[in-house]
Image (cartoon, rainbow, N blue to C red):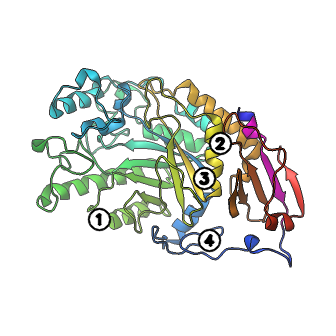
Amino acid sequence: MVARVMAIMAALAAITAGPNLSAADKPEEAQEGIGTFGAFAASKKWTPPQDSAVLKKLAGWQDQKLGVLITWGTYSQWGIAESWTLVTTRYPWNKRPEKYAKLDDRAYMEEYENLITTFDPVKFDAGKWAAAFKDAGVKYVLPMAKHCDGFCMWDTKTTDYKISAPCCPFHVDPRADTVKEMCRAFRKAGLSTGLYFSKADWHCPYYWLPKLGPGPGLGPNYDPRKHAAPWRQFKEFTWKQVEELLTGYGPQDILWLDGGTSGIDMDGMVAMARKHQPGLIVVDRTVRGPNENYLTPEGYIPSHYLPYPWETCMTMGNHWPYAPHDHFKSAGVLIRNLCRIVARGGNYLIGIGPDASGEFDPVVYVRLSEIGAWLKLNGEAIYETRPAQPYESGDCVFTRRQDRTVYVIVLSKDDNGTLPERVAIPGELAANARRFTLLG
């Protein structure tokens, strides 16, 4: 199955500048977003950064193509939809465990937050994860520092709702500051790191006022315009947490902000963050504006080339965190996703989550190994490339390097599909090719 996907790369090599270059081979003007190799202009959906250090780091991030997001917390013990069972609104995907389904919202929150007293991920091995990611061809990793439930996976000084709290069994382990352990191990393996951080915090008494109980959704359970004092305290709390993460955990490339919360002076917080981490890429998801340095379509791949920086974030299985008996995408699906995303101008962020013991499902390691095997053979058509016009044609997608080498990636239709005996190269590409080389 995977082999049918692996041996599918043909390269149009050494397309060099000359008198008969087609429009498809000339450097593109930047129009509504990103031009060729780092030329930025405004977009209706995307506001280009003005900081040259951010632009440089953003271009480097676009070279990396493949990342991993690690979703992990006390909820891994129950195998549920991370924090989302806490809200009062029920959906098919955020059902509460049957044992607690009949509890009222306050009582359920008490049981949920009591998970801290049994969270003991003794099999956690950041070095093992780093080796698996590196072998897979992953270039950057985003450990989850905090999800919406407010549980901190680092040794914060802002709250006792953290993995290093005395009531958490794992606090005695020298690896208890899991964010520090992960960032250190990943950087040692040569991987870039960033941090997932939820601005929404349902444990924080300044976000969900205890007297009002759990809220129906992502936002605070009160109107900040009518209750300025707790909102001001929440803003200070959030800034302190972000500053901790950006001063005590080594160099970070990305601050990946979830939760959609506004009104905490993002411009000021980002300025503070970049004072500590110059050039930091900030992804204030779904908010739009100058603090959303790239866009993050979740769970889907845009259907065509997009002229601005973007990243599809998508689970390897059916869930972001660990879920018992999860169904994982095949290596073929993951590789085809990567190829289409890169040809359309994006990066691919694959979501995985360890179980309560701190270990990934064995299938995760298999998939990472399979992706890595394919990229070892064909990675030059993925890394440090940009989309090449006409971007796609049938089951072919096109990328190119700055030296004008163009790659034609031929994709099977599915895991059981066969590759065509012949591939038709679009006329303008074929007409300007000096030689053809089959990778591998």
Q: Nearer the viewer, residue 225 or 191?
A: 225
Say whether disc 1 or disc 4 marks the residue closer to the N-terminus. Answer: 4
Q: Residue at x 62, y 71 (%)?
A: 35
Q: Which residues are magenta?
A: 4-15
Give, as a three-letter code, the residue at label 1. Answer: Asp
- Report the residue marked by disc 3: 341
- Report the residue marked by disc 4: 35
Q: Residue at x 27, y 22 (%)?
A: 98
Judge whether residue 10 is colored magenta. Answer: yes
Question: Label for residue 335?
Answer: 2
Say whether disc 2 or disc 3 marks the residue closer to the N-terminus. Answer: 2
Instruction: Please say if the residues under marks 1 and 4 sit with CB atoms less than 8 Å apart.
Output: no
Taking 295 as reference, is 84 left or right? Answer: left
Taking 218 as reference, is 286 left or right? Answer: right
Give, as a three-letter code, the residue at label 3. Answer: Ile
Q: Secondary structure at mark 3?
A: helix
Q: Give the farthest residue toward the right.
A: 435
How crowded pointer 4 is (Cα within 10 Å; few <14, some 14-19, many 20+) is rated as: some
Q: Position of residue 203 (x, y in %)?
A: 23, 41
Judge whether residue 108 is colored magenta. Answer: no
